[in-house]
Amino acid sequence: MVKDTIKIFCRVKPTKGKLAIYDVEEKEDADIISFNLPKESVEWMVNNKKENYKFQFQSAFDQKTRQDDIFEHVAQPVIDNVLQGYNGTIFAYGQTGSGKTYTMTGGAERYADRGIIPRTLSYIFDYYSKNPDSVYATSVSYLEIYNENGYDLLDPKHEATKLEDLPKVSLHEDSEQNIHLKNLALYPAASEEDALNLLFVGDTNRMIAETPMNQASTRSHCIFTIHLTVREAGSATVRRAKLHLVDLAGSERVSKTGVNGQLLTEAKYINLSLHYLEQVIVALSEAGRTHIPYRNSMMTSVLRDSLGGNCMTTMIATISIEKKNIDESISTCRFAQRVAMIKNDAILNEELDPKLMIQKLKREIQQLKDQISMTNGDQSTLDLSNEEISECEKLVCEFLQDNNPESMIDVGADLRKVHECFRIIKRKFNEKASVRSITPASSDVSTIREKEDNFNSNEFGRIKDLLQQRDNEINILVNMLKKEKKRVKNATSELKKAGIQPPPTPKQDSTFDSQNGFYSDSTPPSTTQSDNFSQKAVGPIKMKKQDETRQKKILNEMSIGRQEAFDTFRREYKLNHVLEQHKAELKSLYSQAKELGNEVNTSRQQINALKSKLERERVRVAMTDDQDSLEEEIKCNLDSAKTSYKERFNLLKHLKAEIEHTQHLLDSSKMKLLKDFEIWWAEQAALNQRKQEDSDLIQRNSRKVDSSYDNLGKTGWSTPHKVEKSTVPADIPLTGDPQADADIIAFMEARRKALSRQGKR
Ligand code: ADP
Ligand code: MG
């Protein structure tokens, strides 16, 4: 058991705003962050007591700290323990806008801005590949708690429904007081790619569920959980661990947000659940408290182990040091100090799996029986039958193809079969060696060849296809751009010929918007399907495709007028540079990948050529008995070609992850563009409606006014039947009140007419 207090870290968000006076002081085993609030400068808060506030953290990261540093210092120690079988939790706490999501998930602009969650997934799968002697299983879940209700962010139904319409995740406590979550699915992730896709799907769903009204991302808590199972090959002991990565709702207080209506309900709930979190933390930090109120809210129930239980927990307090935010930052730091007093008892979650134990014991019994029968000498001396030989052959083949470190050839206690299996293995080895002309002495080269073979058939083929696909995409894009330019040029010269001034920004009627990479056609060319990087990860990929389909569906469902509005909106869109940046990055990444792919190919060809050369040299030496062999030199060249091949191959793998990530950032930006357009469209519609209503009212009122002036008309005044908007001189100040304005306009009109009559006389 490891008894340890919750570790607390502080991260200061970079800011260009007006700074408060603060300082980060690095000490040997802790950092101190201090705020100085001279009384006279404090306008935004009541500060009658203190001028100087000091808070101690494990580490305090100042504005310039990069994401990889945060990962290394905050997350890595927790993950290392999780991989050993301890539960872990990392949670971000701070006011809205202080950088919680940036720290946990990452920024939307660059690959280097990836946050703790994607980095954790990469780290875990990298660990697996470096430690192949154990058997691993990984699955993830993504829970969002909004207004005290839980929702599964990975639920495929997310596509069509609002957050509130989804089945709610509910809590159940078993007789041993373990919490179970109903309706929250665990998705297995066989590779880093699968896991990252699941994260992307969840984040996209989180974004889609957000509306201007519910701004769920600041008002909800999100818990991304990674479940791990680790077992050493041959062992029946399983280690299970959970890692919660938590992005809490904004910690700001209601009084400051000044909310009402629905927002009040939300604020009340966020504050309620953060309030209950505080209560739990206060209760835990006070000595002698026996009752801890975990059950008061869903979040504290889910995180019960993380707070004072079986878990290694770390908190990262995110703060903003802009003057106007300093009171919230102090309150965040104060909360962290309380959290640091909580002791957790992390237990190694190790258990014997009875099924595996039974299997293991059965195997042992069989082995002992085999040993007895061998020592008793009850061995048959008859030749093996043909069936028995083919059975041995089959077992050897299965064994050679199985990557599981636990696999064995089980032929029982029959020495004849054991020897037959050895014979088959030898034959197969020699066959392979002769096919590739490799002598047993160069077994190293043979391993490389096998690896290469695997690479050739799987990874390389896939990446090559993908590059081809990207090339096609880029070509299509460039062609469309050219066509579009030509079209615009022609149209402009036609207009000029006809003496008409062309519009400043021509509207595109192509099915493809070359600016933003959107299709407005229901059947985009198949070469542009950009998400099939992995054929393996069927589930997550399917979900990702759904996102793409969803985007296209939204565009297709737009009326022509709305599409025109969308085009205009898109041209002026404030985040166009982000979209452009992602696209430029993707393009450059693809061309880098292409180049690397070519280099990998060249290295492979070099290796092949050197292998043939080596073989020829060996034959030559054998035949001529020449002592001056070039073998060593060729081997040396082969080694360096091998190294360069490996280096490039690894780079290509890394690039692939970067391409995936950037593609997701681009997809998210497109989704944001659509959402922002929807908001803008709704605002425009509301504005138009209001204008229409106002003008109707003005006309109605002016008619009333007209009829009252009709009486004047009878006395010789001619009054207008209708007050036209255009007849209102621009210098007449209107009040904005429709009734009053109608009266003013009617009066001015009457006055104008009266004056012109007088003038005529
Ligand atoms: P929160 O989740 O706490 O509400 P966000 O993580 O969404 O806050 O951050 C608000 C904005 O500030 C985002 O645009 C984010 O990219 C940016 N931001 C936050 N922290 C950092 C940082 N350390 N470096 C650069 N940008 C940051
Ligand atoms: Mg956030």
Image (cartoon, grey):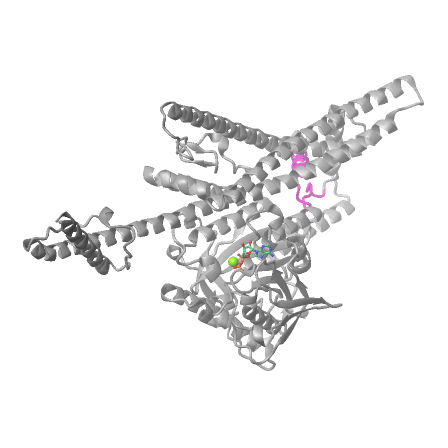
State the residue lying farthest toward the front. 761
Residue 429 placement: quadrant: top right
Q: Position of residue 451 (x, y in %)?
A: 70, 34
Asked if the magenta segment contains residue 393, the reply would be yes
Give the camera-side residue of 533 and 30.
30
Horizontal arrangement in the rendering, residue 354 relative to residue 577 (left or right): right
Give the camera-side residue of 395 and 12.
12
Asked if the magenta segment contains residue 119, the reply would be no
Q: Position of residue 211 (x, y in %)?
A: 41, 54
Q: Position of residue 89 (x, y in %)?
A: 60, 62
Q: Decide: is 413 above or below 249.
A: above
Horizontal arrangement in the rendering, residue 29 relative to residue 542 (left or right): right
Residue 621 placement: quadrant: top right
Residue 384 placement: quadrant: top right
Give the camera-side residue of 582 and 289.
582
State the residue lying farthest toward the left. 714
The part of the chain drawn in magenta is 392-413
Q: Is residue 440 visible?
A: no
Q: Is residue 659 visible?
A: yes
Horizontal arrangement in the rendering, residue 221 relative to residue 21 (left or right): left
Q: Position of residue 74 (x, y in %)?
A: 66, 60
Q: Decide: is 748 above or below 593.
A: below
State the residue lying farthest toward the bottom. 288
Horizontal arrangement in the rendering, residue 147 relative to residue 445 (left or right): left
Q: Residue at x 49, y 51 (%)?
A: 202
